[in-house]
Image (spheres, grey):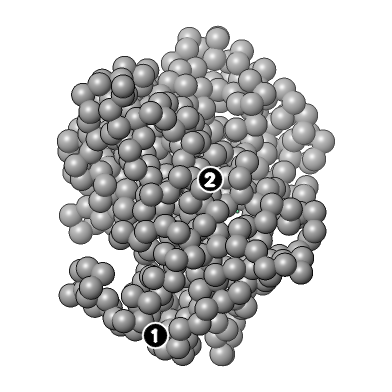
Amino acid sequence: MMDKCVTVIVGTKWGDEGKGKIAAREAKDANLVIRATGGANAGHTVIYKGMKLALHLVPGGIVYPQTTCIIGPGTVVDPDVLCSEIAMLENCGIPDVKSRLKISGRTHVILPYHKDLDELHEKMKEHPVGTTKRGIGPCYSDKDNRIGIRMYDLLLPKAELKKKIVEATKLHNQAFQENGMEECIVDANNLTNHCQSVGLKLKPCITDIAPIIADNIQNSKKIVVEGAQAFRLDLDHGDYPMVTSSNPVTAGTLCGAALPPQALKTVIGIDKAYNSRVGNGPFPTELPASIDSNGNVMEYTKPLEGDIIRELGHEYGTTTKRPRRCGWMDAVILRSAKYTCGIDYLCINHLDTLGEIGNRIGYVKICVGYSYQGNIIDFYPDDIELTHEIPEPIYKTLNGGWTIDSSCKTYDDLPELAKKFVKIVEETSNIPVKY
Ligand code: IMP
């Protein structure tokens, strides 16, 4: 029998639910904190000694000196971003960053041509995904094509590494040539030199993570998987093709972290009391907002409901600063997330903000079902691409709003209307709300 010592933090919608905050809370008494999927498309904000640290790759658990932090083999890492993040953490006085951070040598590396390809692929699509342009998709597709460059490769002798880079970029260079992007054509010699120099900086962290994981599980040490992206952005279970290129659902994070499923103890699903999405794709409870087709905020004199939520919730991307599309809480998606991600408990962030939104608009809404193709359904439909129909939300409305101040610490301290909101979410999603 294997001890159950793993807690997974998973996003239940389209990212930006506030996973970093709960991951940091769970990491307080953890021994190991692991990033398992995605790359610098994620953005987690962590507060350390009053300083606001924006992390894209290093797990937020690094702020606790007892933790070892792993960047798992399921992630894709931009080594330049990682080097800057490590330097920033060291400058902030966080101890022993390089000795506590372990990067799986199997992790695939995002190089500048991946970002150029991301740009090109988006430009060529009639319906762009609205990616973060961090090179995520192209790096994962190189991995699938078995032409990826991995962390271990950065430590190879120059000639060997150069050979791999030449092989990896043959087709990409042709694409740059054909699409008038000659400036992006890879100079294999320069890139090899660059890779070797970042490889040298990261060398103390690049390692085989399997023995570390085995040791932690054998000794029943608490392991936290810090989820990135979310259920509806999952490559296999989200709104394909408007998704990311990894599997942020629980099973995907276990694979990306190199963890055995038998060690899983708890899955905490994270959501916000209202919902948001950045990038394109279906969003049934989205509210009208003054955002143009390029995702920019237009000038307005009277804010629409989506603008009110965006402004009160400060809904702008941590990574790209893009304004987020905003809408009401969709508890139907939570019900689907419960089963696909095996969620044990929910954390609902921004309940205070939703109260303010209610105070301003006069009501708050919760989606408890959908009207779709002439039927009432309580599960997120799979065939939206086929029907070209976005499910019509069926709402429960609570009149008014509420105010939550810092004296509110428990469920019992909540205003009655906020408690009612939480109850409706629990009943619809069939998941207990714990935080
Ligand atoms: P990519 O991951 O950059 O390829 O982007 C694919 C889609 O996922 C786009 O709609 C992005 O906006 C979205 N996305 C990726 N990472 C995040 C995240 O951390 N938070 C929110 N949305 C994300």
Does label 1 point to a residue whose CB lies under 8 Å from ligand 1?
no
Nearest the viewer among 26 and 416 is: 416
What residue appears at the point 65 percent right and 64 percent down from the top-left corner?
377
Rendering coords of residue 344 (x, y %): 38, 49
Residue 215 visible in the current orientation: yes
Q: CA distance from mark 1 to mark 2?
A: 32 Å
Count neighbours of disc 1 (C-alpha within 10 A) and say few if under 14, some if 14 to 19, many if 20 or more. Answer: many
The tag on residue 340 is 2
Position of residue 280 in the picture relative to residue 196 (left or right): right
Rendering coords of residue 26 (x, y %): 26, 47
Q: Is 342 above or below relative to 83?
A: below
> Does dot 1 land on a helix, a strand or a loop?
loop
Position of residue 132 in the picture relative to residue 423 (left or right): right
Residue 34 visible in the current orientation: no
Rendering coords of residue 414 (x, y %): 27, 76
- Badge 1 or badge 2: first in the primary sequence: 2
> Does dot 2 land on a helix, a strand or a loop?
helix
**Residue highlighted by disc 1:** 401
What residue appears at the point 43 percent right and 49 percent down from the top-left corner?
343
- Identified by mark 1, the residue type is Gly
